[in-house]
Amino acid sequence: MTVHFVLPGGVDDPASPSGGNLYDRRVIDALRSPHLAHSPHLPPSVHEIVVPGTWPQPEPAARSALNRALGDLADGSVVVLDGLVACGVPDVVVPHADRLRLVVLVHLPLADETGLPPTLAARLDTAEREVLRAAHAVVATSPSAARRLTSHHGLARVHVVAPGTDPAPPAVGTDGASRLLCVASLTPRKGHDVLVRALASVTDLSWTCAFVGPERWPVRDLVDRHGLGSRIELLGPLSGPALDHTYATADLFVLASLAETYGMVVTEALARGVPVVASAVPDALGDGGVLLPAGDVTAFAEALRRWLTDDEWRRDLRGRAFARRRELSTWDETAAGLAAVLASLPT
């Protein structure tokens, strides 16, 4: 079987990392790996179709390029479409559903992006529903996301194929408490404003925090207004050894997202045994850390103060992180899960 993977432009751009892009790349690479030979479902060969554009609201040229790409595929072809590309353009995607076997991979429901005008969110939500109902299969990256898509869009079934993690050595940290790390694009949905305000309430204690991710929102201004410029480092996007180093030297991973489908950065921290305090990531976190209400500055401030002052609690969180570390799945398992979905498609 050949599977055609439709990806957004910039999927491999190190200056613009995202969980969705990383998931796409790692799954494609794993599908091509000989390690899947033990799977009961033969791994497909993969043909990548990269369509640049301002997805999910593309310009006319991008819409035409996607339509041409789908139109060039033979009848009966299996096509996995990144939901960012597919879900906003039902007028382009749905007409191909009668002759192509379409699988839509939803990383984040379009209307869940923070800060959208209500009319735009409603329009994207309606477009997504039309695309998902026309697809032969829908894949979500977490059980909670699958349940939400099923009920919200009235779908018969949504498959769950959770992200994997790479094995990593345990983090050495710094002094065991004071080095905090947040890895997330600086956008409103990631809740950096919640985290900055919480951190501003514990300036009587010793800590520094690294924010790793592309700046797409003026968080620097907020940091400066709270007088935290010497405490919060805005490191920009990192990858490879530089990103590994930030995890290895972290004592606590913090993420104040308002909405997440999964939260791969959380499992990347847990894979190194780094304790986690976060919101909106129940599936990634499991029992491996502290899950707080999204947007709750007071809850984050209290958790940070307790982390910085309570030795016994820190030991407990480290134990939870290491227990969760042993449960994490691999990218080969993720690829095998997707291969099983593809093998189940009617011919």
Image (cartoon, rainbow, N blue to C red):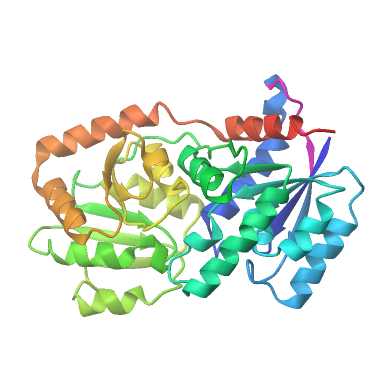
- Image coordinates of residue 67 in percent, x first then y, are 82, 64
Q: Is residue 182 left or right of residue 2?
A: left
Magenta highlight on residue 45: yes
Q: Is residue 325 left or right of residue 68?
A: left
Q: Is residue 251 left or right of residue 325?
A: left
Which corner quadrant of the image does residue 7 belong to?
A: bottom right
Q: How many marks?
A: 0
Magenta highlight on residue 257: no
Please identify the dominant SS of the magenta region.
Answer: loop
- Image coordinates of residue 48 in percent, x first then y, are 77, 51
Which corner quadrant of the image does residue 234 belong to?
A: bottom left
The residue that appears at 53% across and 54% down in the rendered structure is 108
Q: Is residue 181 left or right of residue 337?
A: left
- Image coordinates of residue 320 in percent, x first then y, are 27, 31
- Whether residue 250 appears in this view of the structure is no
Region of the chain picked out in magenta, as a range = 39-46
Above-or-below relation of 140 to 205: above
- Image coordinates of residue 81 in percent, x first then y, are 71, 52
Above-or-below relation of 310 to 88: above
Relative depth, front residue between 53 and 135: 135
- Whether residue 138 appears in this view of the structure is yes
Give the quadrant of the C terminus.
Answer: top right
The residue that appears at 84% across and 47% down in the rendered structure is 100
Relative depth, front residue between 190 and 11: 190
The residue that appears at 9% across and 58% down in the rendered structure is 205
